[in-house]
Image (tube, rainbow, N blue to C red):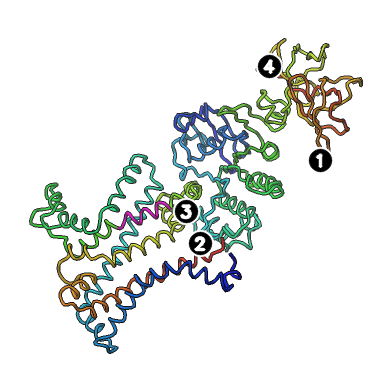
Amino acid sequence: MSSAQLSNGPNRFASILLILPSLAIIGVLFIYPLGFSVASAFFETGQFSFENFAKAIDFYSRDIVFTVVIVFLATAIIAVLSVCIAGYLTLGESVLAVAVLKWLYRWPLFIPFIVSAQLMRTFLAKNGMMNNILIEAGVMEPLQAVSFLDWRGIVITFVWKQTPFVVLLVAGAMAALDRTTIEAARNLGASKLRILIQIVVPQVGTTLMVGLILSYVTIMSVLSVPMMINAQTPTMLTVDMAWRINSYGDYGVANALGIISYLITGIVAWFYLRQGLKEGGAPK
Amino acid sequence: MLGARINIENLQASYGSVQVLHGINLDIAAGEFVALLGSSGCGKTTLLRSVSGLFMPSGGKIFLDGTDITTRPPEKRNMAMVFQSYALWPHMTVRQNIGYGLKLRGKSAKDVNQKVDELAAMLGLTEFVDRKTPQLSGGQRQRVALGRALAIDPPVLLLDEPLSNLDARIRLSMRHEIRMLQQRLGITAIHVTHDREEAMVMADRIVILDKGHVAQVGAPEEVYERPANSFVAAFMGAENQFRTRGGANGEAVTLQSDAEECRLPKSKELGDGGVHWNASGNADVSIRFRSEEATLVPQNEQTDGFYRINGTIRQASYPGGVRRYAVQTGEDMLIVDELKTFSEGDQVSICLKPNAIHVFEEE
């Protein structure tokens, strides 16, 4: 149907009718709660004010910084690991190693965040499995054992949980590449690492970025992992929001923290949308 | 001379349980242009990829200037390959594509740029060097791929059907350009193709492969005039096959034609105008000839010095320049290109001069 036809009276009405159910669902389940929480962040007892934001920054500025550092650090590590794993799956020559890696790397995808967090608690604690293995193996003394249940634990859990997701996307894109572009580089004398960095990754850059952005947004929204791994301050904003609501019934500050979270994710969402527009608008 | 010598000894290759190369032996001199010619699935690309190192053969050896390189990884062979799909890197400009091999060899940015500019000028790419490769036409991409391969001054250039994706007009000119470049640079070239004419005009020697075996190796004229077997003859255009009885002695060939015997001179060397006899003594033989090397006469017309096959015209068509006739002779249908006009149903004789006839043992 052409745009000229769409602008006709009856057709236009019919097309609006057609998208009305989905518009209504978006409006009721997404726009209204979003608008409501934005409004309640700015209106304290019916008056427009920045009081909730002042309080949020006063109480939780360290947590804001902590959250930003955690998500950026976790995303950066995910980027490196996913390129390494997907790169090995694409360029690796040992058929057995590639098959084993392909089978293993997906497991965390099917484990919920809360189970992952619980799993990491038993693995990363002072007397957890990781330290026990290291002590048994004679790598360190029992007195040297420290707990990783702090910011490191959060980063490790997010990386463990989200890397397979990004690998899945990136390895798919790498497998879809024209193999001869890789062979041409080998033929000219490029090593595997060079091929990965200079030939393969630039060609799957968009997919990698999309995977990382989606991962970043997911990490921003998880409550269970920081709550279970790092029961101390500073912590992540999701924990603070839950705390404001559950302990104080303070929706104003919780919503202000929510908007700060929106802003942090908004930066990468902007990149994501811009990429989408660029791809959609690119000549085929 | 820049080119390197290649020796292939008893090379075997298989994909899983399917063997595709059955003991290939081939010696290629430095600076020689060799075409690997064969139909799809004959193993010609596998042979080229084995030489490049991108495919690991299951047996045999490959030597480069006397050094065994069979297990050497492709990045250490110093051979440059031009791929059928061109395999250009879409995220790089023409300059970056051509200069990549030089960058890998640690050349300074100045040297790289100078070499890229030289090659771009030689290949007519100067105005495109700063464009990304997806913005180029097929012919331009092909030139970039060639430039990228030539930039590293390779002793061996491997060409994997580099012209098959080009339109007919550009393909014809690129054949000559590649051949001239190869001769000017003095490098050894191995060119894979299924196009007979392309192999003939480009190569010093042609290697014809049939189901993973070397069917014949020789200069273009040799494989054209002296096909080693029925398969090579058919591949070199002598598609018509007529079964009869025949025999030969030192000087002459006798071929059965309808009720009578036809005696013709036997060829001893290229270009002497005799019958190319490639069978044992008196036996069932098959005659092969090219449709354009035969003429048609009405059956009642007398001729002298020709071998004649009688038949009936079943189909007439006009492909351009000549008329093409399908002539039924017993069970065989033979194709003849002829200037004269005949009609369907006409009783005709196909006349073959001795040098148009290739005789092989009946299989």
- Comparing B319 with B103, the one in front is B319
Dot 2 falls on which chain? B
The disc placed on residue B361 is 4
Q: Secondary structure at mark 4?
A: strand
Q: Amino acid at mark 2?
A: Ala
State the residue position of label 3. Answer: B104
Residue A168 included in the magenta stretch of the image:
yes
Instruction: Please check whether the numbered discs 2 and 3 fall on a single chain.
Output: yes
Relative image position of residue B109 (x, y in whole percent):
51, 61
Residue range corresponding to the magenta coloring: A162-172
The disc placed on residue B320 is 1
Dot 1 falls on which chain? B
Quadrant in which residue B240 is drawn? top right
Foreground label between 2 and 1:
1
Mark closest to the chain's N terminus, 2 or 1: 2
Q: Secondary structure at mark 3?
A: helix
Mark closest to the chain's N terminus, 4 or 3: 3
The disc placed on residue B243 is none
Residue A83 shows in the view: yes
Residue A263 shows in the view: no
Callout 1: few (<14), some (14-19), or many (20+) C-alpha neighbours within 10 Å? few
State the residue position of label 2. Answer: B109
For the C terminus of chain B, the quadrant is top right
Q: Give the CA distance from mark 2 to mark 1.
A: 54 Å
